[in-house]
Structures are given as structure tokens and as C-alpha cells.
Amino acid sequence: MLLLRINDPDSPVSLVLFFGTVGMLALTIGLIVFIIFHQRKVIRYQMRLQRLEQEQQKMLLNASIRLQEEERQRIAADLHDDAGPLLATARLYLNENLVNLDKTTQLQSIYNAKQIIDDTIQLIRNISHSLMPPTLKNFGLESAVNDLFQKISGSGSMNASCRFHDYRERLHPDEELIIFRVIQELVNNILKHSNASFIHLTQNLGGNKLYIRLHHDGRGITQNDFEKLNKSNVGLGLKNIQSRLKLLQGRIFFEKDMSQTYYKVTIEIPKQEEEPAGE
Amino acid sequence: MFTKNILKALSGFSGILPIVFFLLFLKRNNEKKLWVIFLYVVLSFLTDVTAGSLPDHSQTKFYVFSFFTIIEYTLFSIFLYLNFKSKKLRWMILAALPLFYILAGYYILNKDQSKLFDAVPASLESILMIIFCVSFFFEQITDVEVSFIYSSKTFWIIVAIMVYSSATFFLFVSAEFLTQEERKAYWFINLISNIIKNLLLTIAFIIPNHKPQPISERRYDDELFQKPAL
């Protein structure tokens, strides 16, 4: 139609040409400006997302450092308050004056010092076990979790049970330790905050993933609460769980059971491919 | 008439600017795709000089312009081909190339050469270039990179091609239906577009070379620490 009009000797070619050129230029410039602004917007959005992610990671790192410091302080306090006085008392029994005492008193002092040293050995063993449970190292995650739950049940405060359905092949010791620490933290939280009367743990394998689920009947949290706590400055333990699971590329879900009676916590961990043996 | 001559001279000599700046900043412009544009700028300048020295009704002038249209389309296509990431778009450019040659060849050989302007190939070139440039921008906005689009030389070159093609499109389309006098009267559109194109190409050759970095690979530490002097 436009060409027909141009073809007509009476048509205002100059107008068509003018408006056509101006229109095309306006469209082109408009398109270029739109692309520039759109791209700036997208990049800014991406950068903001990345910054948020970095802040989240920073918070996780801070939580992990703080937890490490707390653990160090606890060990330092145990050593200073318990092992220190015990060893100092043992030293008192074994002072230079001992040689000047009569034989019966000497024997009594040595016996007392020996008792105190035995207590100290036990105390140090307990500290060491709390750092790295020997059951976990020697017999694996299943035994270590069984052990932990038996201790909780044995205390009489709560009914704790666990069942591993498919754990024939042990995971890498480092992975087992991380999972055990996560379970420990979750159980600790349940003991401290939930006021539950029972706690039950089940393990399963699904595809190439390992699932661990904890049920309890106390006060719990949902995924929303978990995410809120994760973004806030509180919830150090939860942040620690998150950062530990991140190492295994694992995930955690907090939810309330359909029956509204129980709370469930599910941990999902992808099984790592075995590294080929070195030559 | 005086203004037109000034404009003509400015348009012709504006072609020197990108040549000079390309050579001045040779180190930062030493890329295959930029050499393609440099070759185009040189040929464009030489064509302008040659065509300007030929008489208005010369048949040689028609052949010089027609030959240049084909060269121009080829060089722009090579440049776009080197810049497209999508295989589909690369194939589109390759497929359009022989079609353009056939059409342009047919038109040049069968044209009423009294008009002295290859309107159809030039219009076809403009419309194809606009389509390819829009496709390029579309590809750019779907590919998220940290560097802003206008910090790349390619962006300025594509803008130059697109602005020139869209500004001259209507002129080339209507040139088929205009008398030589009328075409001369409107030729200032081409001259102004040519000046703008050369200025944009000059900007492209002046700006520093910026390699885009994917957003995921960007390290924020880079903004805090300087690299050690090696």
C-alpha cells in the first residue's frame, strides 16, 4: 500500500520518506534504549541476588565460627575447671614432703593421687569422646546414633528410638561425622526446646539419596520458621546444621505431620560417587 | 547547494575517523571481527572517494555502488556471524548470504541502469541487517553477563549498523520510484546516517577492550584487593 502511494506521481513522497525514516530511527533508538535499560535491570537483579547469597553464606560462616569458639570455650572450661583442680590435688598428694612421711601415709597419699589421676583420665576420655565419638569412628553412623539414642532413653527423660532400614555400606567417615553432628544438633534442639515425650529416627535409601527422618511430638518448627531463623541473627545451631549440610550438598526440611500431631525433620543427602583409587 | 556540498564532504571525510582511531588503538582493536569492520570502513571510504570523482551519470558509478553494496553486506554478515553465539542465527546468516547474492546479481544485471542506483539490493541489505541486529540484541539480553552491554565494542558497531540501516531503509526503498533529481534532494539522509555511523564506529574503536565475565565467576574480592605487581 505504501509502495503504491509512492508510485503515484501525486503522492507526497517526501512525507512518506520523512515519517518513514523518522519512524524507523525512533524504533531503532527506542529498541536500543530498551535493551540497555532492560539489561541493566537484569544485571542489577542478578547482582542483588548474588549479594544476598553471599550475605547468607557470611552468616553461616559466622555461625560456624561462633559455634567453634563456643566449643573451644567449653573444652577450655572443662579442662580448667575439672581437669585442672584434679591434677592440682594429685600434685598436692605427691609433693616433696611425701618422702618424709611415714609409710602408711605415703601409701595412702599415693592411693589418693592414683584415684584422682584415674578420674582425670576418665574426664579427658569423656571430653575426647564428645569431640569424636569412638563408636562412630569404629562402628559407623548406625551404631553411633543407636548409642546416642540409648543414652537419651536411659536417662528416662524421653523415649528415644531409631531404626536404620538400609545402611549396609558405610559412608565416608567425614560424611558420617557431619551427619552425626547434624543429628546431634537436632536431637539437642528437641531436648532443649520441644518438650517432646518421644523422638524416633528412621533411615532410608531412595535412588541415590540417603534420607534420615526425625519424628517428635513436642513443639517444633516448620520450613518457614527455619528459613526465617536462618536469615536472622538467632538460631546459631540451625545455621550450623545448614552449613554442615551444604558441605554434603544435602537439604533439610522441617514440617508438621498431616495428622498435626508430630513434627518431622527430614535430611536428604546425595550419595557421593566413589573416587577412583589412585595408582 | 553549499550546505549539501559541506555535508557531502563531511560524510566522505568522516570515514577517516574510524580508520585513524582503529590504527591509533591498534593494540586494543586487534581482533578478527574488528579487522572485518576496519576493512569495511576502508572500502567504504575508498568507494566514497571513487564515486565522488566520477560524473553523476556514469555507468561505472552504478557498478561501483552495486559492488560495494555486496561487499558491505558480506562484511557485515561476517562480523555478525563472528558475534552470534546461537548456531541457529549463524545458519540464518549463512543461508541469507547466497540468497542475497542471487537477488543482487539478478537485479544488477537486469536493472534499468539509467536510474544509477541499486535500490533493491540496498533495501534488502538494510532490512536483513535490521533483522540480524535485532536478533543480536535479543541474544544479548537473554545471555546474562556482568559487563554492561554498552561497554563492548561489538555493541557500538551493531548500533552503527542498525542506525545506518534503519535511517536509510526508506530512502533506499523509495529511491526506486524517485527521479535522479528527487533522489539527490533526499540524499542528505544517507549523508547524515553515514556520519552518525562513522562516529559510532569511532567510539567502538576508541573504547577499551572489555571481556565480559559471567556473573557467577565474578569475585567481589577483586573490588577490594589490587592484583600484585608481577
Image (cartoon, coloured by chain):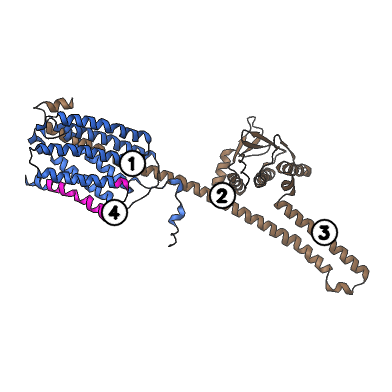
How crowded pointer 1 is (Cα within 10 Å; few <14, some 14-19, many 20+) is rated as: few
The spot of residue A27 in percent (x, y) is: 25, 36
In 3D space, how far apart are the residues under numbered discs 3 and 2 (Cα atoms)? 40 Å
Query: The chain drawn brown is chain what?
Result: A
- Which residue bears the numbered disc 4? B26
Q: Colour of chain B?
A: blue
The spot of residue A68 in percent (x, y) is: 63, 54
Mark 3 / mark 2, whichever is N-terminal: 2
Q: Chain of mark 1?
A: B
Verify CB contact (< 8 Å) between mark 4 and mark 3. Answer: no
Name the foreground residue: A244 vs A4.
A4
Name the foreground residue: A27 vs B64.
B64
In the rendered image, residue B22 lying in the magenta stretch gets the answer: yes
Residue flagged by tag 3: what amino acid is it? Asp
Residue flagged by tag 4: what amino acid is it? Leu
Q: Main secondary structure of the magenta part?
A: helix
Q: Nearer the viewer, mark 4 or mark 3?
A: 4
Residue flagged by tag 2: what amino acid is it? Leu
Q: Chain of mark 3?
A: A
In 3D space, how far apart are the residues under numbered discs 4 and 1 (Cα atoms)? 19 Å
- Which residue bears the numbered disc 3? A118
The spot of residue B119 in percent (x, y) is: 16, 33
Rendered-image quadrant of the N terminus of chain A: top left
Q: Nearer the viewer, mark 1 or mark 2?
A: 1
Do marks 4 and 1 share a chain? Answer: yes
- Which residue bears the numbered disc 1? B82
Could one spot residue A25 in this view of the protein? no
Q: Which residues are magenta?
A: B8-34
Question: Horizontally, is B140 left or right of B130 in the view?
Answer: right
